[in-house]
Image (spheres, rainbow, N blue to C red):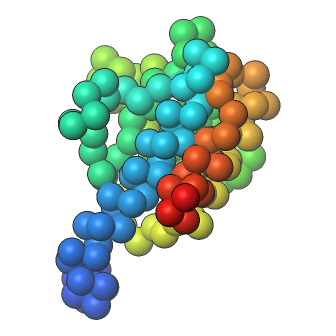
Amino acid sequence: LEAAIKMIEEEGLENVVARHHRLAEGVRRAVAAWAGNDGPQLFCANPSRVSDSVTAVRMPEGFGAEVLRAAVRGRFNVSLGGGLGPLAGQGFRLGHLGDPNQPMGLGVLAAVGMCLRQGRVPHGRGGVEAAMAYFSGD
């Protein structure tokens, strides 16, 4: 706890909050690209209610979130959160809190994108590119 508090104090709380927002927005833009072709979509339907701590993604009908989560974990050693309660099995969660940075976020998005492709899950292309464009200010 002391180490975490020291890291927050060194970065500055406003900077920490801004970093989490940037990461979350980059992920949301990737998911928006994947949503094409009837692909995975944000669970949150109201843009004013999205979270900067976690992004919940709903899988397309007929495609299991647990299969995707297992593939991402098995191939790339990346752990995605599962759907909770009545949403179990319907989607996965991408977390933004802690000490992640933009390249780490892009790595997670690339792992998910590759497993979507390998699993033949319908999705729009360009998720990682959409996040990169946002992160670089394009």
* Whole-percent x, y for residue 21 in the image: 33, 58
Residue 20: give x, y in percent of width and height.
34, 62
Could you tell me which residue is drawn at 54 percent across and 9 percent down? 61
Where residue 93 appears, x then y in whole percent? 43, 39
Quick check: 128 left or right of 94? right
Asked whether, in this view, residue 122 is left or right of residue 87, the answer is right
Horizontal side, residue 53 vs residue 40: left or right: left
Residue 65 appearing in the image? no
Residue found at x 29% / y 72%: 16
Is residue 98 visible in the rendered structure shown here?
yes
Specify the quadrant of the image occupied by residue 98.
bottom left
- Residue 78, image x and y in percent? 60, 52
Q: Is residue 47 above or below residue 4?
A: above
Task: Name the residue: 28% across, 90% down.
Answer: 10
Q: Nearer the viewer, residue 65 or 128?
A: 128
Q: Farthest residue in the right direction?
A: 118
**Nearer to me, 125 or 44:** 125
Query: Above or below — where is 12 with respect to 125?
Result: below
